[in-house]
Image (tube, grey):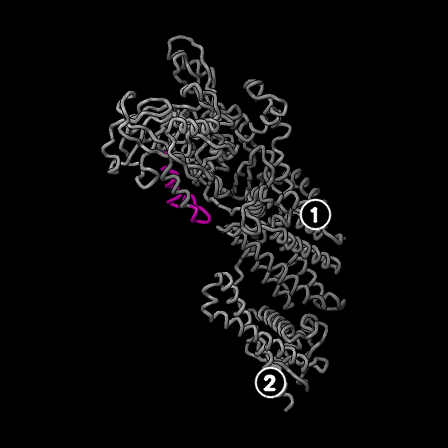
Amino acid sequence: MLPKTYSSKDIELKFYHRWETSGAFQPSGKGNPFTIMMPPPNVTGVLHLGHALNNTLQDILIRFRRMQGHKTLWQPGVDHAGIATQMVVEKQLAAENQSRHDLGREKFLEKVWEWKESSGGQIVNQQKRLGGSADWSRHRFTMDDGMSQAVQKVFVDLYREGYIYKDKRLVNWDPKFRTAVSDLEVQNIEKNGTLWYFKYPIQASVDAKPEGYMRIATTRPETVFGDTGIAVHPEDKRYQHLVGKTVCHPLTQKLIPIVADEYSDPEKGTGAVKVTPAHDFNDFEVGQRHQLDVLDILDDQAILNQNVPIAYQGLDRFAARKKVVQHMKDLGAYDGEEATVHQVPHGEKTGVILEPRLTDQWFLDAEKLAGPALKMVENGTTQFVPKFYENTYFNWLKNIQPWCISRQLWWGHRIPVWYGPDDHAFAALTAEEAKDQAAKHYGKAVELRQETDVLDTWFSSALWPFATLNWPENNEQLDAFYPTDVLITAPDIIFFWVARMMMMGLKFMGKVPFHTVYIHAMVRDEKGEKMSKTKGNVIDPLEIMDTYGADPLRFTLAALSVPGRHIHFSKSMIEGYRNFATKIWNASRYAFQNGVEYSPQFSIDQCQNSLNKWIGIETKKAIQNITQHLDAYRIDEACKDIYQFTWGTFCDWYLEFTKPILQATSHKDRQETEQTIAWVLAQIYHCLHPFMPYVTEELWEHLTEGKAGLLMTSNWPCFETDVSEDENEDVQEIRWLIDLISGVRSLRKDLNIPPGMVTPLGGGAHLRQRLEKFKDPIRLLARCDIREEKVQSCTVQEIIGQETYWLGLTEDYDLQAEVKRREDSLEKAGKEKNKLYGMLQNKDFTNRAPQEVIEKNKLRLKELEDFMAKQNELLNKIKGDSETNEH
């Protein structure tokens, strides 16, 4: 017997183990392959709501296609997460008063691998708890041997073809981790700051008398030592006569040229801009155009170096800032300051303020790879869902910049380049291969040293769709599962990951890596705000599963995943869908208690009872709609259909209609009805399984007594012909009955008839005949007895279809009290309405009041008008029919 209450924890433990050990997660269907590549979470990560949403949507599609008979592969894995992982281990070392530099590279990497094996990847177990049916036997790590070989081959091939090169350029530099970071990983945060004004004397030589002063402004005084020019706009008449002259730097006494460049904005600041090529991206471009010196004044920790006066060497950048300002004041070069608000770049991982820094880095000429990736989306080979995200993809690829792929970290894929004695570079798959190249180049064996930089984490992630399938080996797995079918991911990594996978897939496989890119929403709190620990609005999915179970969490996320909209998530929604799971459980328990038994041989098409014919057609329609929605990636609409059908059509209507049949032991339709209930339950379990796998698997086992195998590997419901909106008489009659009962219930509620009061119901001869046919469900669900003649007291008339029915108000119904109550409420509502109307007509009020107050009053006025109209309509019915009956 099915337990009275649904215990999610017991069921989840039991079935996940059974699913995984059965081999059901591995590709086994005989149909066409269906592949999803799991976006690899960071090895440092724990499951958050974004992961839960992403994994749920993928698992829904995988379970759906698996049940359809496809040979499904959901490829899992985790990313080595260069900076994030190195941060974790370095924090552990810091707690022991050590640093990675104390250990050295080899010992430090041993520590990282130890951490990865003991603590890394805990998110995998959390994904399993959510019900993820990925093929964990194929689990990959971006630094496992096979992935590493793929990364090396791609780098070497691209290097030899001229796509990869080394260059000295400005990059965003993280002084905490002493590494370059991607432009895409920069968070520009608005900060309150200060704009300082300094005077640079205009002098032809260091000893010459100043001809005047150039007034410049800066938010970063510590960079003045890197100034190698002053730029003014060529059409700025204030400065045209100064172009070609020089200023004398107040702190270094060096002469700096004044140049004309359109980068300078005459409307901004003083119109004169100090140019610091080594420490500003725009200044670097100005410097290149005018052949200005490039003077690097900061080391890799943002500490002032040997290129500044000795008094400043070794100072932190912010300490130097204060000292520069004071020094300028002492020299009389300070010319005031003002508060300003500006964007300050921060590192996404470390949170520290970044510095533009001129360094030697490895770059990938991404523009060469962007063309084919653009074309494949433009011609529809790969499609975005929703489609408008294609614009984000296009905008980035059409304006793509060289990709800085090197990082000054120790954890990651070490760049497969070795240098000879003269720094000549040899890219090779192995050290031995590099030695052979060097020997041919130099004519003898030489000592080589390997590049110390590692590759950007996204470089290896870009190979994920094919490297996880054992590329570069041309094996059966690659042939079977590439290209993949759909990528499900968030909008914030369209640049980082989606576009780069498209470029690499086309370059090395000659095919797009996926046919569909499904971009899901971002999860916000119930107010629509981004979740953060500082706001205290973070919802932990692990806590949600502890309280409510995995199924309600999955269904909530899926139901809210409307394409293109952010999800406003709250615990109250979880409670609602937990109630849905309970509703299914209770309905199944009721059916089992009434002797319902499942028969695989039963055919719904052979039913004779009109109720059973109706539910059969409604079930088929629901399944077809759910299937179509899943095919179109409208997972939210599929949720809506299965919810409305299960709770509304099946539980609230069909089960209630069948109670008289099940309660009558000799009813001729009982056996057919019992089998129909079992059949519908089976269809519900199947359609709901991708969304709520645990509870449906448990109920399926009870329904079939464990004789039908796992639900997750059973066949998705499919019918040979479409169920049209036909005019089947039985079906139409049941729909008419539902409309009647719904109408009567609504009327009883409007008339304030007590729920337990049985009221007379009747109509013309033809209508009364139909009412008599369904008198049992009408009495049960509408609390009405069918009468041949109208009652002598009061009746209210309504229309259903083309016929009129009457609802009698018995002597127990206090008509006068009800009329008085409604008239009183109308009088009260009328007074409030007149008051609001007067306020909204008063210009003094509407001119002074906030717009939100005005809109609130307008809304309330509309509510009152609708309420009064409804009450007047009901009063007219009661009074009118009452007067008719009296005559």
Q: Which residue is mark 2?
A: 880
* Labels 2 and 1: the sequence-earlier one: 1
Q: Which residues are magenta?
A: 367-389
The image position of residue 807, as x and y in percent, is 64, 79
Residue that sits furthest to the bottom in the current view: 887
Q: Is residue 132 magenta?
A: no
Q: Which residue is mark 1?
A: 8
Is 502 displayed left or right of 66 in the figure? left
Q: Nearer the viewer, mark 2 or mark 1?
A: 2
The image position of residue 297, as x and y in percent, is 41, 23
225 lies above or below 47: above
Residue that sits furthest to the top in the current view: 444
Q: Is residue 377 magenta?
A: yes
Residue that sits furthest to the left in the current view: 241
The image quarter in which residue 832 lies: bottom right
* Quarter the C terminus occupies: bottom right
